[in-house]
Image: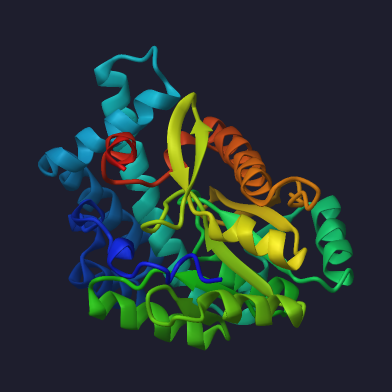
Amino acid sequence: MSAIAADRSASVPRRWTLHGLNSGAIFAATCHGVAILPPVVSYAIGSVGTWMAWRLMRATRDALVDNLRAVFPGETESQLRRRALTTLRSYAHNVIDFLCAVNMPGPRAKELFLLRPADYERFCEIRARGRGMIFVSGHYGNWEIGSVCMRHVFDLSLTILALPDDREEANSIRREIRERLGTDTIEVRKSLDTALQIRRRLADNGIVAMLMDRHIGRDRVGVSLFGRRAWFMRTPALMGYLTGAPIVPCFIERRNREGFDVLLGDPIEVDHEAPRDEAIQQATQAFAAQLEDRIRAHPDQWFHFYPYWQAQAQD
């Protein structure tokens, strides 16, 4: 039943996920700085800090270059290095955006998000079916700010399936922020009944959000991304197969400092007529294709700070 909890030792994250940008001390300092400084100062510090990271954290910069090469195979090393700097800067600005939004009054936070009328109607239509929704995204755009959007735009609570941060300081801050927003968190590796918890939320017509473009141990399914082999998380499609809940891709893209575009992708129904593994692979590939389209449109919004393709090849 619980593909995530089947092998706890296999779910331990690799050391390549523990890069310097994932430091609990850096995240805590950023939270404190954003809380007391004017936004313009926070963004300036973020820009300077990411330029220094780009210059000094060679392994991280090289990893970004290698990842972006899959998106832009014809570009030179110099062009890809510039894109790596833009990606680092986008990441810093997204973190600051999220922390600023958390501290905003509800009406002002609501104004940050632009949702197309057709997407809002689609959301309401899917919710009216009563089967719950599995929101999926990748490490793309501002996925964390989705909890702010759900709270202030839709006035609904959200359940997030999350891998606990290995730095407890950062993990406790994220938990506290989610609790303030009324967001429920199911932490991977914390319970043997993860799948049952997800099923209960969906049975209550709840919304469960997951990131799919990194697998956790044996919780994986192979897809093609930019013509290369990649492993995505299997659980979202498995839950869709078991519950009938649709998989709804959601991408939150920074429009400017004034707000975000909230884009709902094409809902994915897991085919119950096909064999289970085949249906899961097809549904996961359908999401991978939609994520690929968004990355091509905004490559600076895709955030993997380790050699994504090398890591995939090692599994």
How many numbered discs sit on the rendered protein?
0
Q: Residue 212 location in percent, x, y?
A: 51, 53
Tell me the residue at 37%/69% (across/down): 38
Foreground of the two, 218 or 157: 218
Residue 110 seen in render: yes
Colouring scheme, one of rainbow, by chain, secondary structure, one colour: rainbow
> In the image, is 33 to the left or to the right of 249?
left
Residue found 39% across the figure and 58% down from its top:
216
Residue furthest to the front: 275
Q: Position of residue 246 (x, y in %)?
A: 75, 59
Q: With 120 as the anchor, is 90 left or right in this view? A: left
Task: Tell me where residue 133 appears, x and y as whole percent.
Answer: 72, 66
Of residues 296 and 100, the one nearer the viewer is 296
Image point 83% across, 69% down: which residue? Answer: 127
Q: Quadrant location of residue 297?
A: top right
The location of residue 131, given as percent across then percent down, is: 80, 71
74 relative to 136, above or below:
above
Task: Find residue 110 and report its image quarter.
Answer: bottom right
Is any part of residue 107 visible from this angle? no
Q: Image check: 129 left or right of 170?
A: right
Instruction: Judge from the rendering whether residue 2 lies leftward or rightward of residue 61; answer left or right.
Output: right
Question: In percent of the image, x 62 and y 59: which residue is there?
Answer: 238
Please identify the quadrant where the N terminus is shown.
bottom right
Task: Tell me: residue 159, above or below residue 271.
Answer: below
Q: Quadrant of the C terminus?
A: top left
Say if 191 sits above or below 130 in the image: below
Q: Nearer the viewer, residue 292 or 228?
A: 228
Q: Is residue 77 placed above or below 165 in the rendered structure?
A: above
Residue extending furthest toward the left: 56
